[in-house]
Image (cartoon, rainbow, N blue to C red):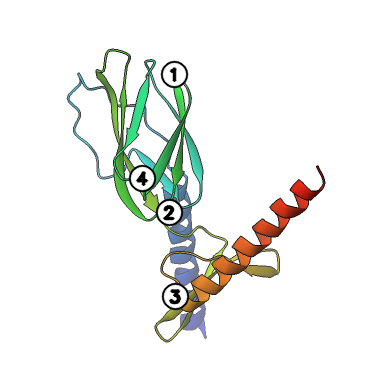
Amino acid sequence: MRRARCSLLILAAILAGASTTALSANKAPLRKPVHAHKVVHRAAVPSIALPMDEVRVVAFSHPVSTVYVGNPTIADVSVIDGRHAFVLGKGFGATNLVALDVDGKQVVNEHITVFGHTGSTVILHRGTAQATYNCASSRCETSPTPGDDKDTFATRMDQVEKHQDMGVKAASAGR
């Protein structure tokens, strides 16, 4: 009995430490932008890390006029003003963000990593098939995500699309 209780306490401590580490990894703060004229040795931690379908605000130390993202299927960038932009995580993976000033000189070259699920996500596996759910309180709703079973994903996305179309039609009928 004493050995089982001790093992449970050790397991609880390990899990508590693992969940704290996972939470801090999901909330990684943005570092200051790296300037082209500085030589910087990159750490293993990405500069901009965010979950898929979430947005982060990036602040530039110098005004920029052009912003590019290496792979637009992984992340998208929307410029707010000359010193700020939104970065949206669109798909799993890594890419980079490059920002240029009015003279075409590189001001920023940052790595972007888009990771998967956060704490409120449940993934149901049935054999090789997978379905993703987002949960709040005691209710879970389907959340079509890349990697889900093809038929389940297509059915859910079709339902979402039809629901959105009905809302647009209803809104335009009231005009």
Q: Determine whether label 1 and label 3 are within 8 Å by CB.
A: no
Label 2 vs 4, first from the N-terminus? 2
Label 4: few (<14), some (14–19) or many (≥20) C-alpha neighbours in 10 Å: some
Q: Where's residue 50, x and y in %?
A: 43, 46
> In the figure, 10 relative to 28: above or below?
below
Label 2: few (<14), some (14–19) or many (≥20) C-alpha neighbours in 10 Å: few
Label 1 vs 4, first from the N-terminus? 4
| Residue placed most toward the observer, 80 or 151 | 151
Q: Determine whether label 2 and label 4 are within 8 Å by CB.
A: no
Measure the C-alpha gap from mark 1 to mark 4. Answer: 21 Å
Q: Amino acid at mark 2?
A: Thr
Residue drawn at (72%, 53%) of the image:
169
Q: Amino acid at mark 3?
A: Lys
Look at mark 2 in the image and give the residue it sits on: 21
Residue 72, which numbered label? 4
Give the SS element for disc 1: loop
Measure the C-alpha gap from mark 4 to mark 3. Answer: 23 Å
Look at mark 1 in the image and give the residue it sits on: 82
Label 1 vs 2, first from the N-terminus? 2
